[in-house]
Amino acid sequence: MRFIQAKNYTAAARTDISLIVLHSMESQEKPGTALAVALWFAGQTAPRASAHYCIDSGEVVQCVRDEDIAWHAPGANTTGIGLEHAGRAAQTSAEWADPYSKAMMDLSAELCATLCRKWKIPAVLVGEAGLRSGARGITTHAAVSRTFKKSTHTDPGRSFPLVEYVWQVGRSLRFEEDL
């Protein structure tokens, strides 16, 4: 996996990470999007934002070390790892189910399972009540925005296959436990 250090992040030595936060990049679904967004996060004109990982249909690029704090979802930055996916929050269910998205979701779910295992995060969906109570699991930028009211982002969107994604992560974790 490539590592391209984002310009904006907070150096830390986190030892307890409790959330995986899912995002959409608000970019085209095309080969090279993960690299392009990672380079944007690293560039001289980088936004005051970053994510731990950028994912497209063929590649995962890490932009911030897990132990450091990426600036991806205000309210959950200190406890979360941000996964950015090529695509847009406005995509339909059919667009999230096309071959490009399917390949991207497979890469992402495998990465997410690895992170869940590493940080002892359960493969469960965490909504607003869970975020307020400090639950561990997988959530979205939209849920973080609604809960903590520090941003207005709605990604990865209502049609993102969230239940299927969390199920796929859990299946990957159970498969490895059976080996």
Image (cartoon, helix red, strand yellow):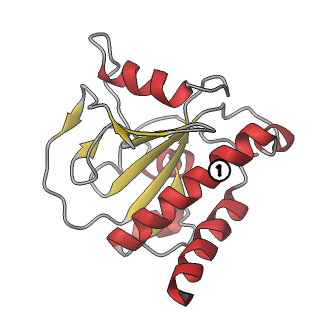
User: Residue 178 versus residue 150: which sits nearer the camera?
Assistant: 178
Dot 1 amino acid type: Met
| Left or right of residue 29: residue 175 | left
x, y percentage for residue 61? 42, 38
Asked if residue 118 is positioned above or below residue 142 in the image, the reply reads below
The structure residue drawn at horizontal position 49% and vertical position 60%, both measured from the top left corner, is 112
User: Residue 116 versus residue 134: which sits nearer the camera?
Assistant: 116
Residue 50: quarter of image: top left
Asked if residue 26 is positioned above or below residue 43 in the image, the reply reads below
How crowded pointer 1 is (Cα within 10 Å; few <14, some 14-19, many 20+) is rated as many
Write down the residue under mark 1. Answer: 105
The structure residue drawn at horizontal position 53% and vertical position 66%, both measured from the top left corner, is 126
Count all numbered tags in the image, as a single digit: 1
Q: Residue furthest right?
A: 94
x, y percentage for residue 1? 39, 44
User: Residue 57 versus residue 93: which sits nearer the camera?
Assistant: 57
